[in-house]
Structure formats: C-alpha cells, structure tokens
C-alpha cells in the first residue's frame, strides 16, 4: 500500500469517527491517539510530496539551463 496523504487522511477520519461512536473511555482515547498519529503521518506525507515537487522543479530548471548553455556554446 502506498503511503500517501490520502491514505493517512482516510485512516485519521476513520479513527475520529470510531472515537465519536465509542462508548468506553479507553476505546475513545485509543481512537483519538490513533487519529493524532494518522494526522501526523498525513502531514509528513504532504510535506514530503511538496519537497519532492520542489526538488523535481529545481532539477528540471537545472537541466533546461544546462541545455540552453550547451546550445549557446555551439559545437566545439
């Protein structure tokens, strides 16, 4: 299973729903802890995705700059 923001977010929502339905305090507390953990993982996955997109954009810009520089240099 891919560790994606959507997956973690869905699990957090499921844990929150289970906590809301829980009649036992210890079950509700467990589900609330699970929700907090899933939300933390979701945020971490979101940050990783943003950083990966930034890195991809930087690599693409570098490749384009190198290609432009190579084209301006002309044949040796």
Image: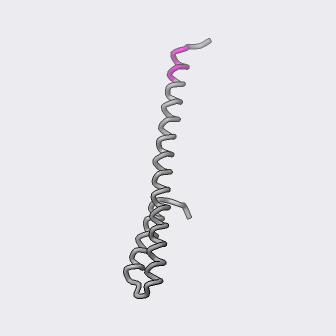
Q: Position of residue 54 (x, y in %)?
A: 47, 41
Query: Does 37 sit above or below residue 27?
Result: above
Q: Please identify the quadrant where the C terminus is shown.
A: top right
Residue 37 in magenta stretch = no
Q: Residue at x 50, y 25 (%)?
A: 65
Q: Residue at x 55, y 14 (%)?
A: 73
Query: Does 16 sit above or below residue 49?
Result: below
Q: Residue furthest top?
A: 76
User: What residue range appears in magenta?
Assistant: 68-73
Residue 72 in magenta stretch = yes
Compare residues 62 and 51 and report the one nearer the observer.
Answer: 51
Q: Position of residue 5 (x, y in %)?
A: 46, 59
Query: Does 75 sit above or below residue 66?
Result: above
Q: Please identify the quadrant where the N terminus is shown.
A: bottom right
Q: Residue at x 49, y 56 (%)?
A: 44
Most frequent secondary structure within the magenta stretch: helix
């Amino acid at each position: 299973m891919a560790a994606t923001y959507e997956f973690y977010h869905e699990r957090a929502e499921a844990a929150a729903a289970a906590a809301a339905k829980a009649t036992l305090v210890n079950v509700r507390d467990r589900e609330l802890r699970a929700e907090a953990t899933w939300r933390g993982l979701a945020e971490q996955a979101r940050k990783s995705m943003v950083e990966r997109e930034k890195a991809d954009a930087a690599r693409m810009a570098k490749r384009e700059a190198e290609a432009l520089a190579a084209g301006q240099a002309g044949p040796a």
